Image: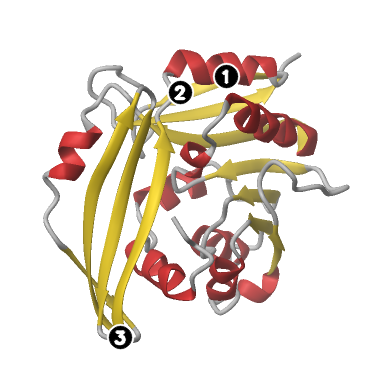
Amino acid sequence: MDYQNPEIAHIYDSANPWADDCDFYLSLVGPHACSILDLGCGTGTLCCGLAGRGHQVTGVDPAAAMLVVARRKRHAEKVEWIESTAQSYRSHRRFDLIFMTGHAFQTLLTDADTLATLRNMRAHIKDRGRIVFETRNPNLDWVGEWDARSRLVRMLPSGEAVENLEITGRNGEFISFQTSYALPQGRLITCSTLRFPSREQVERLIARSGLVVRDLFGDWHGGAFEAEFSREMIFSAEVAE
């Protein structure tokens, strides 16, 4: 999706307010101030919420337009914002927690990119730190669910946006789709492809990166992952001993 488009960035922000996923990630932080890296931070909702609670937060995203929206939010001045991909981010800092939220992990379409991201996480995590990210459970029928989705109406500062999603292809682990937005000033069309790797594939890449899985959750309430029913695969990993 073209998140470099300012209008798309505003639509994304409208479609992704604070929700159960943010509460879940917040619950992992605990009461004491810590350092947090959010890779693929989008419009910064979670980053700003964490910074407002006294944590030291760095938000990284490759789309400048998303960061423009993020910098306008409450507590944004407390966050370090970096324009970068998850694979290429570099810092001398090491973090207590590294998050990758909003299913950003599914935009990594090759093993090479996924492994580079996981190794970069390992390089920036403290010895006893934790890395947490989620990806949708590939055992569920996402094509059927998205095909059945009716028109969605988003309210933006510029007016009403009507969203339609059309599946354009499925090939193994990959689902491609086109999203159109009818706006007061015209029509926007974006194209996206997401990867739906299996649990086993993700765990193999985690192990190759020098990390080890400590927990696997299936929902935003910390429930156990069930292969046939859970919507999410939420991985919590640490540096392998």
Q: Is residue 176 above or below residue 43?
A: above
Q: Secondary structure under badge 1?
A: strand
Identify the residue shown where x is 17% and y is 39%: 145
Q: Can you tell which quarter of the image residue 175 is in?
A: top left
In the picture of the structure, the residue carrying the numbered disc 1 is: 213
The correct choice, above or below, for 146 with respect to 112 in the image is below
Residue nearest the observer in this picture, 132 or 164: 164
Name of the residue lying farthest toward the right: 92
Q: Quadrant of the N terminus?
A: bottom left
Q: Are marks 1 and 2 in contact (CB under 8 Å)?
A: yes
Vertical arrangement, residue 37 with respect to residue 139, above or below: below
Residue 168, by quadrant, is: top left
Q: What residue is shown at x 65% (from left), y 58% (from top)?
A: 59
Earlier in the chain: of badge 1 and badge 3, it is 3
Q: Secondary structure at mark 2?
A: strand
Q: Which mark is residue 185?
A: 3
The three-letter amino acid code for the residue at tag 2 is Leu
Mark identifier at residue 115 = none
- Three-letter amino acid code of the residue under disc 1: Val
- Which residue corresponds to the image point at 29% horizontal and 57% vertical from the top-left? 179
Q: Is 234 left or right of 149, judged from the image as shown? A: right
Horizontal and vertical percent for residue 119? Answer: 72, 29
Nearest to viewer (mark 1 / mark 3)? 3
Q: CA distance from mark 2 to mark 3?
A: 44 Å
Relative image position of residue 31 (x, y in whole percent)? 59, 50
x%, y% of residue 37?
67, 49
Can you say which quadrant of the picture contains the C terminus?
top right
The structure residue drawn at horizontal position 40% and vertical position 29%, both measured from the top left corner, is 196
The residue mark sitting in front, 2 or 3, is 3
Crowding near pointer 3: few (<14 within 10 Å), some, many (20+)?
A: few
- Between the residue at mark 1 and the residue at mark 2, the CA separation in whole angstroms equals 7 Å
Q: Mark 2 highlights which residue? A: 216
